[in-house]
Amino acid sequence: MPKVLITRDQIANRVAEMGRQITHDFTGESVMLIGVLKGACLFLSDLARQINLDATFDFIAVSSYTTAKQSAGEVQLIKDVTGPLQGQNVILVEDILDTGLTLTFLTRLFQARQPRTLKIAALLDKPSRRQRPMQADYVGFIIPDEFVVGYGLDYAEHYRNLADICVLDNDAPK
Ligand code: IMP
Ligand code: MG
């Protein structure tokens, strides 16, 4: 079984803090949460309930890790948002900031659509893996260079439903 790195209670407490911070930063305004499928869907649904503001949701999908632990090195948009971003306070919600390739691609794409503000909320951050200079505005946990699964994160599409964030044992059976 995968080894627990961050417990469900730690996740809940930190996500609540992130929600309070976002609520504070956007007082009196609306926010548009854009989740990066599929990994961010659990994080978005918990974070959204901790944000005490008018909020809308949208989702995008990009190609990244497909069936393995290695990134292809290039990012493609597979599914776009359904509405315009112009004038919106957009918060991109991502499961993990790793090499930075995905968020570099997405911030460039979305900045061109003239949102009022564009912020990034990443549950996890692995700064030691960065290939592009990229920082999230809201970070849940900084973690070491280990491959993690659970709470939305997958290995070859498995383990997304684990309630805790776990480190995948290299020789663990799937
Ligand atoms: P980046 O473009 O390298 O920053 O990668 C971001 C994407 O890589 C995330 O949305 C995840 O889907 C995936 N990823 C990176 N590290 C991990 C990990 O440790 N476990 C599972 N997925 C990961
Ligand atoms: Mg992913």
Image (spheres, rainbow, N blue to C red):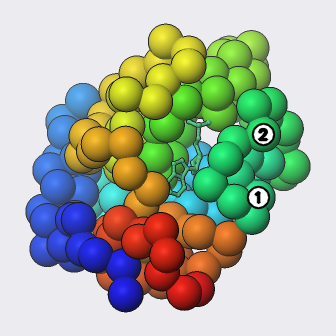
Q: Is residue 46 visible?
A: no
Disc number placed over residue 72 in the picture, else none = 2
Q: Residue at 41% across / 71% down in the picture?
A: 169
Of 70 and 170, the residue lying toward us: 170
| Residue 90 spot, x, y in % from top left | 53, 33
Disc number placed over residue 66 in the picture, else none = 1
| Residue 95 spot, x, y in % from top left | 47, 52
Of 47 and 132, the residue lying toward us: 132
Q: Residue at 47% across / 68% down in the picture?
A: 170
Residue type at tag 1: Thr
| Residue 146 spot, x, y in % from top left | 38, 51
Quarter-of-image position of residue 99: top right
Task: Assess disc 1: are there few (<14), some (14-19) or many (≥20) residues with their C-alpha within 10 Å of its C-alpha.
Answer: few
Q: Residue at 46% across / 30% down in the picture?
A: 129
| Residue 75 spot, x, y in % from top left | 79, 34
Q: Is residue 2 visible?
A: yes
Residue type at tag 2: Ala
Callout 2: helix, strand or loop? loop
Of 71 and 44, the residue lying toward us: 71
Question: If you read the primary sequence from the N terminus, does the residue marked by circle 2 or circle 1 appear first?
Answer: 1
Q: Residue at 14% across / 50% down in the picture?
A: 17
Disc number placed over residue 168 in the picture, else none = none
Do the numbered discs 2 and 1 sit on residues whose CB atoms are within 8 Å? yes
163 to the left or right of 24: right
The image shows residue 55, relative to residue 67, as above or below, that is above
Callout 1: helix, strand or loop? loop
Task: Assess disc 2: are there few (<14), some (14-19) or many (≥20) residues with their C-alpha within 10 Å of its C-alpha.
Answer: few
